[in-house]
Image (tube, rainbow, N blue to C red):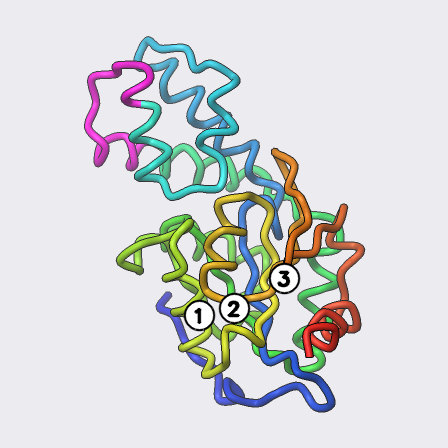
């Protein structure tokens, strides 16, 4: 599957300054952050290494190149970054093939955005092969555009993925609401100039300017997202 831009990409939600909603995937829409760590533990165990649980907070939410590179350096494992990336993606794809739980409120939020024709993009640090697999459960019809971590020059925490999503939808990043679950993703969205709704999954995230923290996606709906933009005006 390739990224696509919807015909309604430049349509602004009537009566609202909100132009688009950009959503992270792992830990935000699907409950998979723990899956990645489990796969990393399994792969390194097969290589004869034990991962320290404290490293989980270091690798969460970032691009595979950073996470895998850190774990190779920390363990001294004799494997290349390219080889490890293949093993991790293979292991993760097998894991989500058995079960792929959605985060509470995710299905309802996506359905609401679709029903109101709000331009929506999926923006993930995961590779394209993983995004396309997850989309079979999330529903590709909910997204006008998808951006994978291996499709941009620099992925999160750099702003590139969110800037690419906004450009693809034909909207102003400052009028986009981003939903993220990690500090890495929040940093990327804020660097792109978006307003962020943080739903922390593994590590706490504190409120800040242009950043609202909620406990669950069940606290987020279209009225809430439009309200964030109204407060900024």
The CA distance from mark 2 to mark 1 is 7 Å
Label 2 or label 3, whichever lies nearer to me, is 3
Q: What is the x, y in percent for residue 167?
A: 41, 77
* Residue at image mark 2: 121
Classify residue 108 by image quadrant: bottom right
- Where in the figure is residue 90, as x and y percent of width and height? 36, 36
Main SS category, magenta section: helix
Q: Quadrant of residue 80?
A: top left
Check disc 1 and report the residue beneath it: 165
Residue contact at pointers 2 and 1, CB within 8 angstroms: yes
Q: Earlier in the sequence, mark 2 or mark 1?
A: 2
**Dot 2 surroundings within 10 Å: few (below 14), some, or many (20 or more)?**
many
Can you identify the residue that label 3 sits on?
210
Q: Magenta residues?
A: 72-87
- 126 left or right of 223 in image: left
Q: State yes or no: residue 158 in magenta.
A: no
């Amino acid at each position: 599957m390739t990224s696509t831009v919807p015909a309604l990409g430049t349509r602004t939600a009537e009566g609202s300054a909100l132009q688009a909603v950009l959503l992270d995937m792992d830990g935000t829409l699907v409950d998979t952050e723990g899956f990645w760590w489990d796969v990393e533990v399994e792969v390194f165990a097969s290589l004869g290494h034990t991962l320290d649980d404290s490293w989980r907070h270091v690798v969460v939410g970032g691009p595979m190149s950073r996470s895998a590179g850190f774990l190779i350096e920390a363990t001294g494992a004799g494997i290349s970054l390219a080889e490890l990336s293949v093993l991790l993606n293979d292991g993760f794809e097998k894991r989500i093939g058995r079960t792929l739980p959605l985060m509470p409120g995710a299905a309802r939020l996506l359905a609401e955005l679709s029903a109101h024709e709000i331009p929506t993009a999926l923006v993930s640090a995961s590779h394209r092969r993983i995004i396309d697999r997850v989309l079979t459960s999330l529903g590709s019809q909910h997204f006008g555009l998808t951006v994978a971590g291996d499709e941009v020059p620099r992925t999160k925490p750099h702003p590139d993925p969110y800037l690419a999503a906004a450009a693809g939808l034909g909207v102003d990043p400052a009028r986009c609401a981003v939903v993220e679950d990690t500090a890495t993703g929040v940093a990327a969205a804020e660097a792109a100039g978006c307003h962020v709704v943080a739903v922390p999954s593994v590590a706490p995230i504190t409120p800040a300017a242009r950043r609202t923290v909620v406990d669950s996606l069940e606290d987020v709906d279209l009225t809430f997202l439009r309200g964030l933009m109204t407060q900024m005006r």
